[in-house]
Image (cartoon, rainbow, N blue to C red):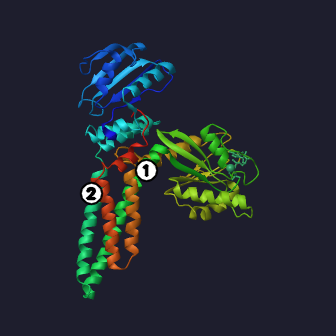
């Protein structure tokens, strides 16, 4: 029912001189006929028209209408696009008239959702459209173009199908194991083989999860965290890099408590710089809460800038051992007052004189290139698929820990079902709703 209604939405934001609307669905042609008094619209021709409401009152004396008959339109349905003068009153009058003609406002992403259902584009291409609209940096732009133009293969079916095939092989072995319950030797051999295969599958699923995590980071900003003892100049560096006074700076150790984040664009990558509370032993409960936040955030970061000054150099080993992110860069601060010996793996900076800031930026960029450039070029299939992979990962770990064979098999069947529903029922209402709800209205 929902998909047979005729919908409309503005494609342009308010504030310009012209508003562009898209109408899609079986009533699109009738709607433009009623509003213009014109009976024929040749497909893909632009007509200058007068828009009138159902009572014959003027909406706009000068508008443009283009009609795209199905299936040669964005959604694959009958589509009409109408440009009229911008301005709140004109637009309100126009929308009221569309409602009177039985149309309703499209939900976010509803045009793209219909396009996918009508086979006009794949789910990956539809996501590419969204990424393109949202892209702020060069790398986000590149990723969106690659995803939209299908230069890359879609991940949804292929990847999940692969995992499912592996699971089937596993289940076949598990069933075999269940058939020989009394033959201890055979069953324990099979059980070991099963454990091994579950482990292999966990590694595969983890790789897909990593890929999805990277894609998400490319869009929302790659977390780069500033960690170190109090007073080494973390907040000063954040401010210097952001060229903005975002965080409080003082010579009192323990100034920063909350996590302060700033988005910067480094070499086309959206980087989320994260300033944190200085790490030390403390009796102050508020400071301790801040330090716990530092630790929590550090685990999620892609790059840790481990910051020390001349006076805290001896803490390097202890602090390094507490780092979890995949990349740790040692940053020595206050280079304007401390003469450091330049070391290959170390970046020396001064927030005051700004020396070393460019080097630090290029060092981070180099790591980002190595880690993220291949993910930029590969299409993904959105958060819903990521959710399925996350659930599969948890269940597979449970299956690995479980020693009772019947339960193990049951868990594996559940994983199989989860993945099957994602692969084959991807046009299910609920799944599509979740995917497209993140789009903007008019897409
Ligand atoms: N000379 C010099 N002083 C600096 C530099 N960076 C920071 N400072 C000083 O060092 C002191 C501490 O700076 P913050 O940026 O607040 O240090 P922090 O690491 O954020 O400290 P906490 O928030 O307490 O963990 C301040 O007095 C700064 O002015 C620098 O590059 N050169
Ligand atoms: Mg600070």
Q: Earlier in the sequence, mark 1 or mark 2?
A: 2
Q: In the image, residue 335 lies at what x, y percent?
A: 66, 47
Residue situated in front as seen by the camera: 175 or 65: 65
Q: Residues within 10 Å of mark 2 (few under 14, many from 20)?
A: some
Q: Position of residue 373 (x, y in %)?
A: 39, 45
> Where does label 2 land, which residue?
161
Q: Is residue 170 left or right of residue 303?
A: left
Residue 232 placement, left or right of 149: right
Q: Quadrant of residue 131?
A: top left
Residue occupying image coordinates x 40% and y 30%: 9
Q: Position of residue 77 (x, y in %)?
A: 27, 32
Image quarter where the C terminus lies is top left
Q: What residue did someone put label 1 on?
A: 214
The residue most toward the top is 61
Query: What residue lies at 52% left-to-right and 52% top-to-bottom?
Result: 303
Answer whether labels 1 and 2 touch (C-beta < 8 Å): no
Query: Circle 1 — which element?
Result: helix
What separation in Å lies between label 1 and label 2 (alpha carbons)? Answer: 21 Å
Percent position of residue 44, x then y: 26, 21
Residue 138, by quadrant, is: top left
For residue 147, which numbered disc appears in the image?
A: none
Res. 87 visible in picture? no
User: Residue lying furthest right in this view?
Assistant: 252
Relative height, residue 158 to residue 88 (above, below):
below
Badge nearest the viewer, 1 or 2: 2
């Amino acid at each position: 029912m929902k998909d047979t209604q005729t919908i409309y939405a503005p494609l342009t934001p308010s504030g310009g001189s012209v508003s562009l609307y898209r109408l899609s669905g079986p009533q699109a042609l009738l709607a433009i006929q009623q509003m213009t008094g014109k009976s024929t619209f040749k497909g893909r021709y632009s007509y200058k028209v007068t828009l009138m409401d159902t009572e014959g009152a003027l909406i706009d004396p000068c508008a443009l209408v283009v009609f795209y008959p199905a299936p040669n339109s964005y959604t694959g349905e009958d589509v009409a696009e109408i440009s009229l003068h911008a301005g709140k009153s004109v637009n309100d009058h126009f929308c009221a008239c569309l409602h009177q003609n039985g149309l309703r406002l499209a939900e976010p992403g509803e045009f793209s959702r219909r396009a996918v259902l009508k086979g006009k584009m794949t789910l990956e291409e539809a996501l590419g459209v969204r990424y393109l609209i949202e892209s702020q940096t060069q790398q986000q732009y590149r990723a969106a173009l690659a995803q939209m133009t299908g230069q890359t293969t879609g991940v949804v079916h292929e990847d999940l199908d692969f995992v499912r095939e592996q699971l089937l092989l596993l289940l076949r072995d598990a069933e075999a194991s269940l058939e020989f319950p009394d033959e201890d030797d055979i069953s324990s051999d099979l059980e070991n083989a099963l454990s091994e295969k579950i482990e292999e599958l966990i590694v595969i699923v983890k790789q897909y999860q990593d890929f999805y995590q990277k894609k998400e980071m490319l869009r929302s900003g790659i977390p780069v965290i500033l960690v170190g003892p109090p007073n080494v100049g973390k907040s000063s560096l954040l401010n210097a890099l952001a060229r903005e006074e975002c965080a409080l700076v003082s010579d009192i150790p323990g100034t920063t408590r909350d996590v302060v984040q700033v988005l910067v664009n480094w070499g086309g990558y959206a980087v989320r710089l994260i300033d944190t509370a200085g790490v030390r032993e403390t009796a102050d409960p508020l400071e301790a809460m801040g330090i716990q936040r530092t630790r929590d955030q550090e685990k999620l970061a892609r790059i840790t800038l481990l910051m020390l000054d001349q006076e805290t150099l001896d803490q390097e080993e202890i602090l390094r051992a507490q780092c979890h992110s995949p990349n740790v860069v040692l940053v020595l601060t206050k280079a304007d007052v401390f003469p450091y010996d330049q070391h290959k793996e170390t970046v020396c900076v001064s927030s005051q004189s700004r020396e070393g800031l460019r080097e630090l930026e290029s060092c981070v960029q180099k790591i980002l290139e190595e880690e993220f450039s291949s993910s930029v070029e590969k299409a993904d299939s959105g958060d819903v698929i990521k959710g399925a992979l996350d659930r599969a990962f948890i269940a597979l770990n449970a299956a690995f820990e479980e020693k009772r064979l019947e339960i193990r098999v049951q868990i594996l069947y559940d994983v199989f079902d989860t993945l099957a529903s994602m692969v084959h029922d991807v046009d299910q209402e609920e799944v599509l709703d979740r995917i497209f709800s993140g789009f903007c209205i008019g897409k």
